[in-house]
Image (spheres, rainbow, N blue to C red):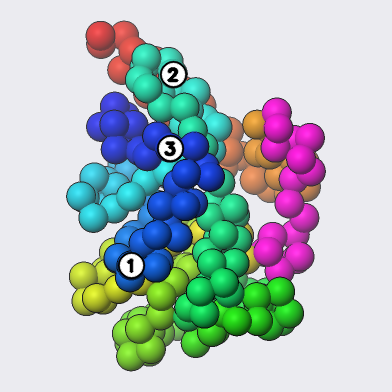
Amino acid sequence: MREYFEKIENLPQDEFLKKMKQCLIQEEKRFVVTANPETLMFAQKDGEFREILLNPHTTIVADGIGVIKGAKLLKMDLKHRVLGVDLALQLLSSCHELNKSIYLLGAKPEVIEKMKETIKKDYPNAKLVGAVDGYVEDKEAVFMDMYKKKPDVILVALGIPRQEKLINKYYGQFDKGIFVGVGGSFDVISGNKKRAPSFFVKLNLEWLYRITKEPSRLKRFFDSNIRYMFEIMKERGKK
Ligand code: UDP
C-alpha cells in the first residue's frame, strides 16, 4: 500500500483543480485515477491494474476518505482528498471557459443523453465532440473516433477497473488530452442520482449516504474495505 500512497497527489483539492486547468491550457497530457480503497485493493490482486497505478504517466488522487485514513495509519503524509465528481465538474467548466473540447464515454444511454443536455445548457462553450454510452460493444472504435477528434478532455465512466484499463490501452497514442476515469459521476452530474448532501460530505460520510440509497453496494463496500483495513494493519505491523 505504501507505494500507492507515496504516489498519490497531496495537494488541496482547489490547488489540484487549478493544476489540471493549467494542463488544459498548456495542452499537457494527463491520465488521472481517482482512488478509493476498492481501487487500491483491486491493484493488489491484478498485476495489470497495479502497473497502471504505479506507471509514471499516471496521476492518482485520493477520492475516498478511506485512502486518507489508511495513509494516516501507516504514518504517511497524505492529507487531501480530490473528489472525482468535483474534478469532472471543474473540467467541464474549464472547457466552457476556455472553449475546449470534450469527449464522454460511459454510463447508460439515457444518462449520456442527459449529459448532452446538461452540457448544452450549463457549459455551452464546451465543444462536445463525442458522447457514447458505456454499453456499446466496440470500445476500440470509440477510441479510434476519439483519436481523430483530438479532444482536450476525455471522461470515461465505466467503473473500475474497466475505465482505467481502457484509457491505459490507448493513452500512449494520444498527443494531448486530460483522461479521467470518473466512475458514477455522469449519474450524479446528469441529475440521475443525487449527490450526497453537503452534511454527509463535510463529515466524510458520502459512502454511507450512497449505501443507504443503493443497499446493493453494501457487500462490495464491506468486502473491499474490510480487506483493505486488514492489508493496512498487516503493513503497519511490518514497520
Ligand atoms: N457502466 C457502463 N458500462 C458497463 C458497466 C457500468 O457504462 O458495462 C457505468 C454505469 O452505468 C455507471 C458507471 O459505469 O454509470 C459505474 O458506476 P459506479 O457507481 O459503479 O462506479 P464507482 O463510482 O463506484 O466506481
118 within the magenta span: no
CA distance for labels 2 and 1: 34 Å
Residue type at tag 2: Lys
Say which element carries label 2: helix
Name the residue that disc number 1 marks.
26
Q: CA distance from mark 3 to mark 1?
A: 20 Å
For residue 237, side relative to residue 225 (left or right): left
- Dot 2 alpha-carbon crowd within 10 angstroms: few under 14, some 14 to 19, many 20 or more: some
The image position of residue 47, as x and y in percent, is 23, 48
Q: Residue at x 27, y 69 (%)?
A: 171
The span shown in magenta is 187-203
At label 1, counting other C-alpha atoms closer than 10 Å, the crowd grade (few under 14, some 14-19, many 20 or more) is few
Which residue is depicted at the point 29% across and 38% down?
Answer: 7
Dot 1 amino acid type = Gln
Return the residue nearer the eye: 198 or 217.
198
Residue 186's x, y, as percent? 62, 66
Judged left or right of residue 140, residue 91 is right
